Amino acid sequence: MLDVIVIGAGFAGMYMLHRLRAAGLRTLVLEEGGDVGGTWYWNRYPGARCDVESLEYSYSFVRGWAWSERYAAQPEILDYARHVAGLLGLRADIRFRTRAESAFYDEATGSWTVTTGDGDALRARFLVTAVGCLSAANVPDLPGLASFAGPTYHTGRWPHEDVDLTGRRVAVIGTGSSGIQLIPAIAGRAAHVTVFQRTPGYSTPAVNGPLDPGHARWFEDHRDELTRRARSSPGGFLVPYGTRAALDVTAGERQAEYERRWTRGGVGFLTGFTDLLLSEEANESAAEFVRAKIRAIVTDPATAGRLTPKDQPIGLKRLCLDTGYHATYNRPDVSLVDLRETPIEEIVPTGLRTRDTVHEADVIVFATGYDAITGALLAMDLRGRGGIRLRDRWAGGPTSYLGLAVAGFPNLFTITGPGSPSVLTNMMVSIEQHVEWIADCLRDLGPHAVIEALPDAESSWTEQVRELADFTLYAKSESWYSGANIPGKQRVFMPYLGGVGNYRAECERVAANDYEGFLRTRLP
């Protein structure tokens, strides 16, 4: 029997394997894909890149990698993951092309049995899920989809072989993060791109470019200090966080700050003032600034109007970074269909039929996102004490203790699970914190131990996560943060909003207090 089975070989699973092996624990990682990389193994669509700066989207303990751009593209990030796997010799303990179909906890032996898609049954004392928050692709069930004569793709499951869109009429459904990256990348290559948009979103410029070698050297020289700063910050990002409220300064000062951050680019646009996610009036000042930018970029007033979010706060859905996204609609070979005006009625062999016409297409691309945070966990048949299914346990919405553990599921840890900061942060910072906490916990437990979140601790933590959301504008939002993009999914705001630094401190307090909120027992 193994000590630990880890599901997933993205950045979380790779680091978890490294730490567990260092602790002398016999560990096996199961990975559905053919190599390491997780989301960067699957998301190979044109234009795919990270929206966290490359130097920050790196393991804090790996030195010597030279990034080429401020925001790395998918191939370079995958190369980095492969480099780390080779450097640390991780592949020897990873079983690739192996899907974990189910896992059940045996109370008599205090162990988990994981059944793979190949029918193998593997046993371990502990189970750690490192399945990623954005890995379960969401493909809408559109009438007539099977009748379409051409190929269809989802950005999150892009083929590994080259997809030649040259001279093709491409329909893109969805304008979230992946759509915003994909559309400018294929415009000009395709004969025509027709974009089907349900809800316009905000985006700010990435201002990407070659990485300055001098800055990279400085970052490397100060890596330890910068890591400490990121780990104690609200979001894990090394951006300047403002200390004033937007409503406490003049309109001119607000505009100047927004312009500075717009010009610099990156994820720091909304960190200039302290009240942008707390006050509707403050938020509106930032939202209107971005709306004015969209109107200035897009030359056709009708198209600009359709691309401009109305009566929608900024930042409550993911604030995307873009490279020329809105300017792409100035091209004659790119057109926009507003699905609120003319919804898709069905897919036909030659394209997509809306209320007023058939939009002909040779290829359909779904940029429709994911069943976020819980989707990949619930895709497995996970069963805890008494055979209870996690899907049933979460029928009313996900609950957890610290986003790390679920009551009734002993010896199970969920890296960046619901109830942790996860998707609102620099994921690399959150991944390292969770992995290190889990590794330290298993070291402290010793052999023959069983650890389980207490129901009262789980309830209290879940309520704290909800109260924090209710204190902000997020409580009024409908987004994938709360599962609103998945029909029938219970609406629960899933990320913890208290900040990376506060969350880390709470996890450390729990551990220091003999793992307060957990029940620890020992098998006979």
Image (tube, rainbow, N blue to C red):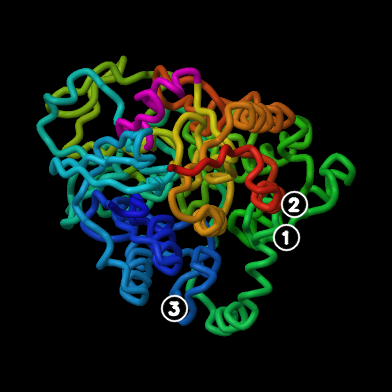
Looking at the image, which residue is at 64% across and 75% down?
Answer: 224
Give how far across and how far down residue 103 sits, in percent: 30, 37
Residue picked out by circle 2: 272
350 relative to 200 in the view: left or right? left
Does the rendering let one see residue 330? no
Give how far across and how far down residue 479 sits, in percent: 52, 30
Separation of residues labelled 3 and 1 (CA atoms): 25 Å
Task: Mark 3 or mark 2: name the one nearer the start of the chain.
Answer: 3
Q: Which residues are magenta?
A: 377-396
Task: Mark 1 or mark 2: name the one nearer the start of the chain.
Answer: 1
Q: Is residue 123 above or below residue 72?
A: above
Residue type marked 2: Gly
Residue type marked 1: Pro
Identify the image quadrant of residue 238. Answer: bottom right
Looking at the image, which residue is at 63% across and 37% down?
Answer: 517
Q: Secondary structure at mark 2?
A: loop
Q: Nearer the viewer, residue 48 or 419?
A: 419
